Image (tube, coloured by chain):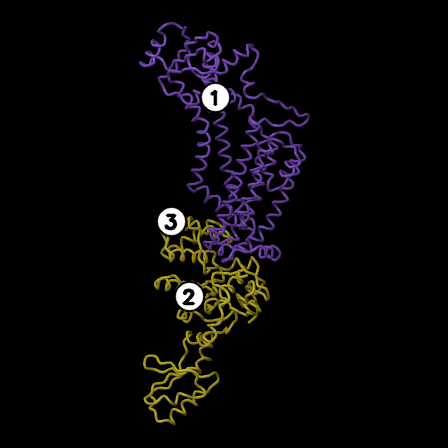
Chain colours: A purple, B yellow
Amino acid sequence: MMWRNVWAVWRREYIQRVQSRWFIIATVGGPFIMASLIVIPVFLTERSEYNDTTIAVIDETNVLLDRVVPALEQGGWIVRAEGWREGALEELTAKIEIGALAGLLVLDGMTLSTGEARLYSGINESPLRLLTMRSAISQAALEYHLGQSDADAVALLQGGRLSVRVINESGVDTDGVEFLIAFGGAFFLYMVILMYAVAVMWATLDEKASRVVEIILSSMKPWHLMLGKILGVWAVSMTQILVWICSVTLFIAAGIPVLLSGRYGLPQLENLGEVLPGPGLWALFMGFFVLGYLMYSGLYASLGAMCSTDQEVQQAQLPMLLLLLVPILMVLPVIQSPMTPMSTGLSLFPLFSPILMWARVATGVVPAWQVGLSFALMVLSVFGIAWAAGRIYKAGILMTGKRPTLPELWRWLREA
Amino acid sequence: MSETDFAVSLNGVTKRFANQVAVSDFDLVVPRGVICGLLGPNGSGKTTTIRMIMGILHPDEGSVSLFGADAEETQRARIGYLPEERGVYRKMKCLEFILFLSEIRGMRRVDGKRRALEWFERLGLTGWADKKLEDLSRGMQQKIQFVSAVIHEPDLLILDEPFSGLDPINQDILEEIVRDLQGRGVTILFSTHLMDQAERLCERVCLISNSRKVLDADLKELKATERKGVVAVDFEGSDEWLRGPEVTGIKESDGTTEVFLVDGADHRELLKRGLQSDVNIFRFELIEPRLHDIFLRHVGSNITGGVAVSENGVSVTP
């Protein structure tokens, strides 16, 4: 009896949602947007390089040229070194006017002492490229002054770097792929958990507001309805996430080599395949998602059952959003120092675990027992929340009028 | 009659919400196979009573039994229910909606589909099966809901204000269907405040006012009892003879005067006084009271009393 009802609710919820226009748009559009975030910049860079960006360089100092040319070439220019001679300036600027040259860079004594150089340009170079050129010149000048080839002017100019090796516990570089996985994954978890849990809330509110709930509850227990609904939306979310993951994997497997073919300068993308999270990490990710979703969907379902109108529910979800703000604000500090007592404590709090424990797991320094403990705590919370949410749902779902006060909620919990 | 002869029986049922009593010490029996009307002013507790029969609400005191057994899920599967607040999944197609509801009532989808299409034809809904519910008018939605109430061939049909929102043609169709179902042995309990409909359809009526049952009787017997109470007179002359200790009120309608007598009064006392006076009496007839008048007589006096519970459900006040 129970499972047949839960199944019927599940099926209705799933089919209705999967058939909806929004589901199709979001499912197909999601990976498309993600892919375009990667493809479009690459494509644009590629486009700009097809422009004829041959520039001539006149070096009056004779010491800068060797250093500037490789830097400019790395920045994408084709460089022609011109010797200093009488009338060269007029001759070359004339070439720029007819479009035979993209620009002329003049380095002189002033460049050597202050880093100031002149660029005659026939095209509108982007500010980014101008910055590249400027730093190439000033670095060349500095390197010359430092006088020794093994001094790394670039590194020194960036203020140096402290490489930390913690024995037993390795921290995470904020520019490594691990950081991206920890940070991006945490945000993605936050986004999908919230998105689908809120969907459960709206579905509950809608059933209540349209009053269709009464006819359904004449044939099944409120708890079964809630369970069917939560599982139905969960199945929708899994479908959507699997489509996303498959298309992203496909994109990485097939798309990136195509993009990279015949290109240079994107070394961090070339070995992306090697640093992508392995199956173990994926399984943990899905685990955090499922348990996080079950906890939050229960909470949001009872919010939906408590309220009668859209406005009410907007207000009622405010405390929930504030609660969710905590893990989001703490993600960065937790990733940077995953082993502090505060990071450990916050990430073990079940409602924060899906985001913060994930972030710590992805850094690779968390002991397995802590991950296990957080999962155990989350499973306990799922049951606790299901118990409480079921009661609130049962009492609230048929109630219209004013939203319950806290003492009334407490009474529902005890009496329902 | 024994317990099992009743489709529904409520024993001393009381339901309170916050600090209000919605239904107080309520007894009701609905024998199998009859059409029973649950009548009462707005806010008198009709919907709450029905919700307790349906197991949506649980009584604080007393008990509900269905078909002579404790009201459990298996008994409730034999009930068809049309709630007063008729909600639908607006984005769903009509047939899908019916199939979903038949499924949660334990039917297989194939059977549900066959019966749904039969009902659609009967109610003139063929061609709407694949339309979304939001494209239907409220009256049409109500018909879909009615189909959902009868789709699993229930033994007991509970209809909360089934006629409100329907045009006269569809009211007649529904009345006919209700009679037809009764002919096939289905027990029907419906709430209404349309006295004409109740009078035409019901064999039994139950009157609720201010959360309490006022009366619960067979309609024919009730009318026979109440018959003593109203006299229609046509006469010429002073109406002085109508003023007496046994008369509670006088109503003029269409040239006829209806005289209402106090309970237990003898109408012959009135006639005797009329003959003694010098009025010319053309007509003196004990008339069958209309349900409307019975309703007003029993309920009218306290109808102005506080309305305890909103019809929309449970209102919570601090």
Q: Is A381 or B52 nearer to us in this picture? A: A381
Q: Which mark is residue A257?
A: 1
Q: Is residue A233 visible?
A: yes
Label 1, label 2: how far apart the Cα atoms are: 75 Å
Q: Residue flagged by tag 2: what amino acid is it?
A: Arg
Which residue is denoted by mark 2 in the rendering? B179
Which of the pair B278/A158 is nearer the observer? Answer: A158
Q: Secondary structure at mark 3?
A: loop
* Element class at badge 1: helix
**Left of A166 or right of it: where is B162?**
left
Query: The numbered mark 2 sits on a residue in which chain?
Result: B
Q: CA distance from mark 1 to mark 3?
A: 48 Å
Residue A395 is situated, as x and y percent measured from the top left of the image, at 55, 56
Query: Tag on residue A210?
Result: none
Instruction: Give me the disc on residue B131.
Output: 3
C-alpha gap between disc 3 and disc 2: 29 Å
Q: Chain of mark 3?
A: B
Give the number of the mark in front: 1 or 2: 1
